[in-house]
Image (tube, rainbow, N blue to C red):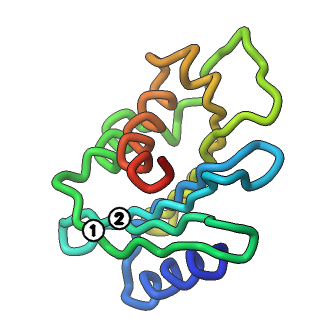
Amino acid sequence: MDYAAEKIINDLDSLGIDTILTSFYHLDNGRGSNATKIIFWKKNGETFVNAVRLKKIDKFKVFGQSKLPSDSIFQFFFDNRLDTVTSNPKSELSISHNFGYSVDFKYGSSKYNLYLRNEKRSYDPTHLKSMWIEMIDRVGRKYYE
């Protein structure tokens, strides 16, 4: 799964794509049956997505490239300057072994990383980081459900 996702990212890099967002939906202590890497990128003003989902320990599925109708995931990040938001969503819950998203976003020469567990996103849904992950998740659900 990691190799397949890295190949997609490396292929995009070799094409000169400089806006690539990789989101990894997984358990906080491992992969889990729904572990999925969802890769978003922009090319010539259009936004695309591809995903790799773990099926079994040594099996995975690559879904193939799809065009998204908008670049709202990227636009939300830039409009709200998420790279400058220092607070994190709060939660009174702590769920052991919960799913969440790890996000690596490369845009130009800049990089942004975020990890957000589902219970924090659910408990504090109006936090900008929660809202952004929710946007990613709306696209991602079709790959891991």
Left or right side of 115 for 77: left
Check disc 1 and report the residue beneath it. Answer: 66
Check disc 2 and report the residue beneath it. Answer: 49
Where does the image place residue 65, in percent across and percent down from the top left?
32, 74
* 111 up-or-down from 66: above or below: above
Towards the viewer: 78 or 8: 8
Quadrant of image for the N terminus = bottom right
Q: Can you name the residue that lies furthest to the bottom here?
A: 14
Name which residue lies at 64% across and 23% down: 119
Q: Residues within 10 Å of mark 1 (few under 14, many from 20)?
A: few
* 6 up-or-down from 89: above or below: below
Q: Can you name the residue that lies furthest to the front here?
A: 56
* 89 up-or-down from 43: above or below: above
Name which residue lies at 52% across and 68% down: 52
Gap between marks 1 and 2 measured at Cα: 5 Å
> Which image quarter: residue 76?
top left
User: Type of residue at label 2?
Assistant: Val
| SS for callout 1 | strand
User: Type of residue at label 1?
Assistant: Ser
Q: Earlier along the polypeptide chain: callout 1 or callout 2?
A: 2
Q: Are marks 1 and 2 in contact (CB under 8 Å)?
A: yes
Which mark is on residue 27? Answer: none
Where does the image place residue 38, in percent across and percent down from the top left?
48, 60
Towards the viewer: 52 or 117: 52
Name which residue lies at 48% across and 18% down: 125
Left or right side of 65 for 82: right
| SS for callout 2 | strand
Name which residue lies at 62% across and 65% down: 54
Towards the viewer: 84 or 98: 98
Where does the image place residue 101, in percent across and percent down from the top left?
60, 44
> Which image quarter: residue 16?
bottom left
Where does the image place residue 15, in percent across and percent down from the top left?
37, 89
